[in-house]
Amino acid sequence: MTPQAKLIFTISLLLGTTITISSNHWITAWAGLEINTLAILPLISKSHHPRATEAATKYFLTQATASALVLFSSMTNAWYTGQWDITQMTHPTSSMILTSALAMKLGLVPFHFWFPEVLQGSPLTTGLLLSTIMKLPPITLLFMTSPSLNPTLLACMAVLSTALGGWMGLNQTQIRKILAFSSISHLGWMAIIISYNPKLTLLNFYLYVLMTTTVFLTLNSTKTLKLSTLMTTWTKAPSLNAMLFLTLLSLAGLPPLTGFLPKWLIIQELTKQDMIPAATMISLLSLLGLFFYLRLAYCATITLPPHTTNHMKQWHINKPTNIMIAILVTTSTLLLPISPMISTIF
């Protein structure tokens, strides 16, 4: 793919996201979502590998269905209330259809099946876009319609997402699939709190984007796609692997790292809302995710290959580590001490 084409698709992505997050009318929000979908498709299928083409097809079909449902829910709401404004989504049936459509866009359970497959068929940089910037428009629409969403439905989807995201990630050997299930699990934490404290959802999303970007950029610089190759990258960039170890633990939500902050605030808010069983359940289910993060961290830093076949040791990377990764690692691990300031902002 030529640099000019990449530039056009990247600008279209930013344009689609900006249109959706800044719109008040459902038609402009839908148009932004469509621009986003069309801009990411060539980036998914640019390798022309059959798996990449399959991933692009699956992504297109799922997103087209979700966009049609968004349009259908907004038209139903306009039919009953005469309102096209995003914040005026008051009709219960429309709200339920919209929740399903945005869950499909995000990859929440039970509409999660496409996400691991699409991420597995995409390059790491496109996978990063799918896990971060492509999630922003649907999260924004959920944020704007949060007062009229059904909290019970969202809580059920959230608990199921955390359970399945942790459970299905346990047996994976492909790192992109593990990160896809990690994303599904994190979306569960965001969905459970959006009806009660939408700003907490945004805080969780921003910190998740920060940590996921760090992991993807690190894996991209060491050219790692599987656990077996992750085991041999410690000779390539030892300090980078040590930082990856800390970022993965932060993504798992272990104190005293940044990832603990949103989990702590969400559990506190759920307790205030008398949702102690939900808070207990989602906390216990996040232990499943902790297992595969520890597995990744263990492979990245602690182990040598477990079998006796000779592994070709990787050459040390001579170029210095990207300054962007250094900044991201610092923020992904050391933001917890300034949590009072962050919670004041949000």
Image (cartoon, rainbow, N blue to C red):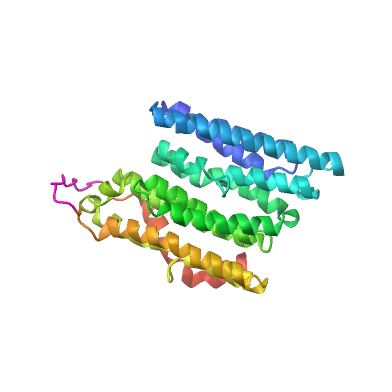
Side of 304 relative to 80 (left or right): left
Side of 152 relative to 124 (left or right): right
Which quarter of the rendering shows the N terminus? top left
Q: Is residue 293 above or below residue 344?
A: above
Q: Position of residue 290 (x, y in %)?
A: 41, 62
Identified at 57% across, 44% down, the residue is 111
Identified at 52% across, 67% down, the residue is 283
Q: Tag count in the figure? A: 0
Side of 170 relative to 236 (left or right): right
Q: Nearer the viewer, residue 235 or 61?
A: 61
What range of the chain is rendered magenta?
A: 307-320
Which quarter of the rendering shows the C terminus? bottom right
Q: Position of residue 285 (x, y in %)?
A: 49, 63
Identified at 61% across, 65% down, the residue is 345
Q: Is residue 331 visible?
A: no
Q: Nearer the viewer, residue 196 or 19?
A: 196
Q: Position of residue 277 (x, y in %)?
A: 60, 70
Q: Main secondary structure of the magenta part?
A: loop
Identified at 52% across, 57% down, the residue is 162
Q: Position of residue 208 (x, y in %)?
A: 50, 56
Q: Is residue 189 magenta?
A: no
Q: Is residue 272 visible?
A: yes
